[in-house]
Image (cartoon, rainbow, N blue to C red):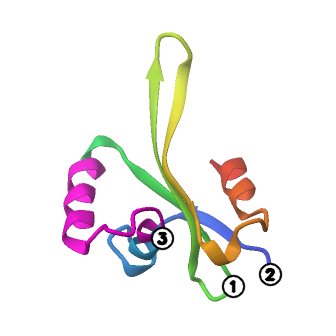
Amino acid sequence: MSTPVIRPVDDVYGEDFFRLVRQLNPKMERPEFERRLRRILPTGYQVAGVYDADNTLIAASGYWVGARFYCGIMMHLDNFIVDAAHRKSGIGSALIDWL
């Protein structure tokens, strides 16, 4: 496998991200997926993704960056997902390092 590319997910409403979300939430239907995105995107929610050589999204994590008195700047991860076919390959660690 060539070196994966990690970057912000271009289309959070796209099929690639929905496919990954369904791996964690198999009962999630597209209308509910889109409803939740519409609700959380305005709160600063962002999604980082890992793309393979074919530009297929193979891992992703949602996150928020914020600040707290007790720690200063912080990041909250949400729905950290590595495609089942790519687990145990270091993709998740690479995504954590990027985040």
Q: Is residue 12 left or right of residue 2?
A: left
SS label for mark 1: loop
Point out the tag, 2 or 3, that comes first from the N-terminus: 2
The x and y percentages for residue 60 are 54, 62
The residue positioned farthest toward the front in the image shown:
27
Q: Position of residue 77 (x, y in %)?
A: 51, 43
Q: Looking at the image, which is closer to me, 15 or 24?
A: 24
Local packing at callout 1 (Cα closer than 10 Å; few below 14, some 14-19, many 20+) is: few
In the image, residue 24 lies in the stretch drawn in magenta: yes
Residue 6 x %, y %: 64, 65
Are the residues tagged 3 and 1 within 8 Å (C-beta)?
A: no
Mark 3 residue element: helix
According to the image, label 1 marks what residue?
A: 53
Q: Which residue position is annotated with label 2?
A: 2
Q: Which residue is mark 3?
A: 20
Q: Nearer the viewer, mark 3 or mark 1?
A: 3
Q: Is residue 52 above or below residue 88?
A: below
Amino acid type shown at disc 3: Leu
Residue 73: which disc?
none
Which residues fall within the magenta stretch? 21-41
Can see residue 49? Answer: no
Q: Residue at position x 59%, y 72% from top?
A: 83
Provide residue 88's location: percent of width, then percent of height: 77, 65
